[in-house]
Image (spheres, helix red, strand yellow):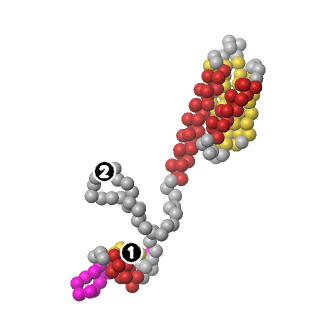
Amino acid sequence: MNTSIVGKNIELTEPIKNYAESAFEAIKKYNLDIISANIILSQDKKGIITTEFVINVKDKHTVVITQKDKDLYASIDLALERAKKNLRRYADKIKDNNKGGIKSLDNGEVEPKESDDNDDFIPLEPKLYKPLDFEEAKAMLNESGENFFVFYDIDENMRVITKLENDKYGLY
C-alpha cells in the first residue's frame, strides 16, 4: 500500500506525521486490497483544519472522506472513523457475497445446525450425493433400516426405493 501525508498551509511535525501514520495502520485491518492511501491536511485563513482521506481500493472506486474541525487531531480522528465505517461496510459486503459459494466436499456426513427454538424439526446441512445404481441404493436402504431411501441414479434422476412386504422393493 502506497501512503502519503501532505500538508497544505500547515507545518507537518513528527508527532503529526506519526499520528497520521497510525491511521494507515487502522485501515489495514480490513484485509482489503488497498492500492494507496493519502491524507491531505490543510488549514484555511480562519484556522479551520480540513482532513481529507483518499483511499484507492482494488475493484472499487476511490473512497474520499473530508472532515473539518478546529483541532487537527480531532479532525484526523473523525475522518478516520468515517473511513473505517466505509471500509467495514465494503468488507462486509464482500464477505456476504462470498458466503453463497460452493461448499467444500467433505465425507458426506450430516451435521445438525444449532436451532434457537424447540421445534420438532432440526435443520441439517444436505449431503453431497453421488449417483448410485439400483443395487447400491438397495444396499444403502438395508443398512439404514429405514422404509425408503432417496438417491440419484446414473442418469442423475432423483429416485426413491422403498421396502415392500415379502422382501421386495419398489422403485419410483
Structural crowding at the residue carrying mark 2, measured as other residues with C-alpha within 10 Å and reported as few (<14), some (14–19) or many (≥20)? few
Structural crowding at the residue carrying mark 1, measured as other residues with C-alpha within 10 Å and reported as few (<14), some (14–19) or many (≥20)? many
Which part of the image, by quadrant, shows the C terminus?
Answer: bottom left
Query: Which residue shows up at 59% across the image and 26% down it?
Result: 78
Query: Which residue shows up at 23% across the image and 87% down it?
Result: 166
Residue 117: which numbered mark, if any?
A: 2
| Residue 9 visible in the current orientation | yes
Measured along the vertical axis of the image, is residue 153 above or below residue 115? below
Say what amino acid the circle numbered 1 marks.
Answer: Phe
- The residue stretch that appears in magenta: 156-172
Q: Report the Cα–Cα distance between label 1 and label 2.
A: 30 Å
Count all numbered tags in the image, as a single digit.
Answer: 2
Measured along the vertical axis of the image, is residue 44 above or below residue 140? above
Which part of the image, by quadrant, shows the N terminus?
Answer: top right
| Residue 110 found in image quarter | bottom left
Question: Is 37 one of the magenta-colored residues?
Answer: no
| Residue 99 image offset from top left, x and y in percent | 50, 53
Q: Name the residue carrying label 1.
A: 151
Say what amino acid the circle numbered 2 marks.
Answer: Asp
Secondary structure state at the residue bearing disc 1: strand
Q: Which of marks 1 and 2 is nearer the N terminus?
A: 2
* Front tag of 1 and 2: 2
| Residue 62 found in image quarter | top right
Secondary structure state at the residue bearing disc 2: loop
